[in-house]
Amino acid sequence: MSRTRWGLLPDFLGIGPARTGTTWLHEKLLGHVDLPRDIKETKFFERYHSRGVEWYASLFKHCKGDRPIAEICPYLAGPRAPEWIAEVIPNCKFIVTLRDPVDRMYSHYKMMRGYAFTRLPVEEALRKDRFLAQGSLYARNLERWFSFFPRDRFLVTLYDDLRRRPQAYLDSITDFVGAGRISLAGRSDRREVINSFDRAPRNFKIAQNARHLRIMLRERDWNRTATLLARLGVWSWCAGGGEKFPPLSAEQDAHFRAMYLPEIEELERLLGFDLSGWKTARGRDDSAPVSTALENARPRPAAASNELRPKAS
């Protein structure tokens, strides 16, 4: 366990990136590992670092230390996240799930629309918001993390495995972090509907005000209130209900795929994965029940260390 001078801190972090099933993973781990009380993403190693480690540790004061402690928060693209984590929990392990970069980017864009961060078309939003593009720059982000932590601390998984083989995907994670396996048999699986952002907001101003209210609740540590409103469906109501987002056109898909091609090829070299499925232009909606982008994507025989490979299903 990560017992520090500040108290108990996470043994492992699910660092994202955003729109790669982090909510699904948090939901499945809940009750089987210890997570921050009343909040999914603390954003401590990103937005709230100035509050101090004592504040972060206070979110885990309920933990008894008899099972792994975790946080699921998309820190992968955080500029100083690996440096700050190395300072306080240097023995931490990391879960990284990678999704087709174009699908992830477009899903992130729809989330931005839902939370009223932008009204711009996706091409303009991508040019103006650096975080939208950076979330899919997996190779350069991972190289930065590898400069702070040994590679065997990382389990790199595929979003396609979550969608198509959720039990094997979850087993690979619990085995890696030393937690007991969690059976999904007989459990309601909401991965198709969690934070799907299929539609634009019914009203931009309502969605914007809801976002400001969530931030205010977060700033005041009123996390229970924010969680209650989420369970009541308030946030999802404010973020949706408008026109349905169209899938990317074949031309848009081809353009974005060419833009990310150098990054995909660098990631193949870094991890030894065959990511040819990410290079093929196609016009389809990323909300399809099962992503087929990585059906044939498997680590190459000459890949990097086994710790970086998805577990066999």
Image (tube, grey):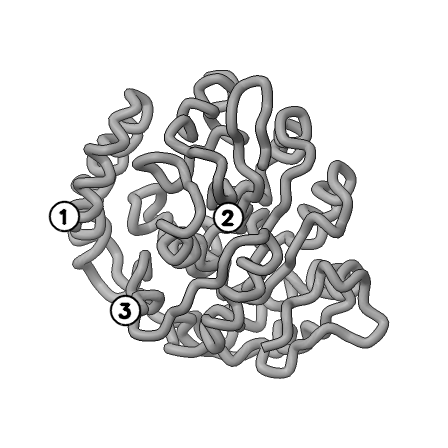
Which numbered disc, 3 or 2, marks the residue closer to the eye? 3
Identify which amino acid the numbered label 3 is placed on. Ser
Q: What kind of element bears circle 3?
A: loop
Which residue is label 1 attached to? 232
- Residue situated in front as seen by the camera: 65 or 7: 65
Where residue 75 sits in the image (x, y, percent)? 55, 41
Earlier sequence position, callout 2 versus callout 1? 2
- Residue situated in front as seen by the camera: 122 or 47: 47
**Is the Cβ of the residue at disc 3 closer than 8 Å to that at disc 2?**
no
Identify which amino acid the numbered label 2 is placed on. Leu
Residue at (52%, 68%) from the top-left corner?
169
141 vs 17, left or right, is right
**Is the Cβ of the residue at disc 1 closer than 8 Å to that at disc 3?**
no
Q: What kind of element bears circle 2?
A: helix
Which numbered disc, 2 or 1, marks the residue closer to the eye? 1
Residue at (51%, 44%) from the top-left corner?
68
Q: CA distance from mark 2 to mark 1?
A: 29 Å
Where residue 24 sits in the image (x, y, percent)? 39, 58
Q: CA distance from mark 1 to mark 3?
A: 18 Å
Which label belongs to residue 188? Answer: 3
Where residue 198 sits in the image (x, y, percent)? 29, 64
| Quarter occupied by the C terminus | bottom right
Q: Hey, which residue is sitting farthest front in the picture? A: 66
Which residue is label 2 attached to? 132
- Residue situated in front as seen by the camera: 17 or 15: 15
| Quarter occupied by the N terminus | top right
Which numbered disc, 1 or 3, marks the residue closer to the eye? 3
- In terms of image quadrants, where is residue 209? top left
In this view of the protein, can residue 70 be seen by the observer? no
Residue at (23%, 33%) from the top-left corner?
224
Q: Is residue 240 above or below residue 169?
A: above
Q: CA distance from mark 3 to mark 2?
A: 31 Å
